[in-house]
């Protein structure tokens, strides 16, 4: 995923357009609009810092083109995006929860492997 795809995703998730993003991050509208019209090759570190701070993602999130290339569905991509925003401790808690789902499957059998079924069985 490139910079603009990530930015579009975060803007959509936060119900923002270029104008509201500009005001929220204190980045000139013409700068943001220019990324879409002329490209983002000259993107400044200060702009990335403002975007990272606003969206709660680390700076390396923007540099890693493999972010969200999980080869899966939109749901999987959204999960990865949320994990990117988490602290290490929060990510460990999510991982523990995922492992617990596997334990539920072992207990209840593989016929109950749909997440909805697991949620019903565990009362989530």
Image (cartoon, grey):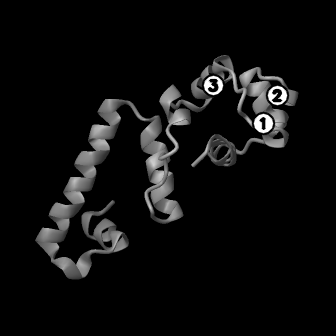
Left or right of 33 on screen, residue 43: left
Using the rendered image of the protein, determine whether residue 89 is visible from the camera's viewpoint.
yes
Residue positioned most to the top: 46
N-term-proximal mark, 1 vs 3: 1
Residue positioned most to the left: 107
Spatial CA span between label 1 and label 2: 6 Å
Residue position for label 2: 31
Q: Residues within 10 Å of mark 3 (few under 14, many from 20)?
A: some
Using the rendered image of the protein, determine whether residue 58 is visible from the camera's viewpoint.
no
Q: Is residue 50 above or below residue 21?
A: above
Quadrant assignment for the C terminus: bottom left
Spatial CA span between label 3 and label 2: 12 Å
Left or right of 100 on screen, residue 29: right
Q: Nearer the viewer, mark 1 or mark 3?
A: 1
Q: Residues within 10 Å of mark 1 (few under 14, many from 20)?
A: some
Q: Nearer the viewer, residue 63 or 72?
A: 63
Residue positioned most to the bottom: 111
Residue positioned most to the front: 41
N-term-proximal mark, 3 vs 2: 2
Q: Nearer the viewer, residue 84 or 97?
A: 84
Residue position for label 3: 48
Q: Is residue 65 above or below residue 106?
A: above
Q: Quadrant of residue 19?
A: top right
Residue position for label 1: 35
Q: Is residue 120 above or below residue 26?
A: below
Element type at marker 1? helix
């Amino acid at each position: 995923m490139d910079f603009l795809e990530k930015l579009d995703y975060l803007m959509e998730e936060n119900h923002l357009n270029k104008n509201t993003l500009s005001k929220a991050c204190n980045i000139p509208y013409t700068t943001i609009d220019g990324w879409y019209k002329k490209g983002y090759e000259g993107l400044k570190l200060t702009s990335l810092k403002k975007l990272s701070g606003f969206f709660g993602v680390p700076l390396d999130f923007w540099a890693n083109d493999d972010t969200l290339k999980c080869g899966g569905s939109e749901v999987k991509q959204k999960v990865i995006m949320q994990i990117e925003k988490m602290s290490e401790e929060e990510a460990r808690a999510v991982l523990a929860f995922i492992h617990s789902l596997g334990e539920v499957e072992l207990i209840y059998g593989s016929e109950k492997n749909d997440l909805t079924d697991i949620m019903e069985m565990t009362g989530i």
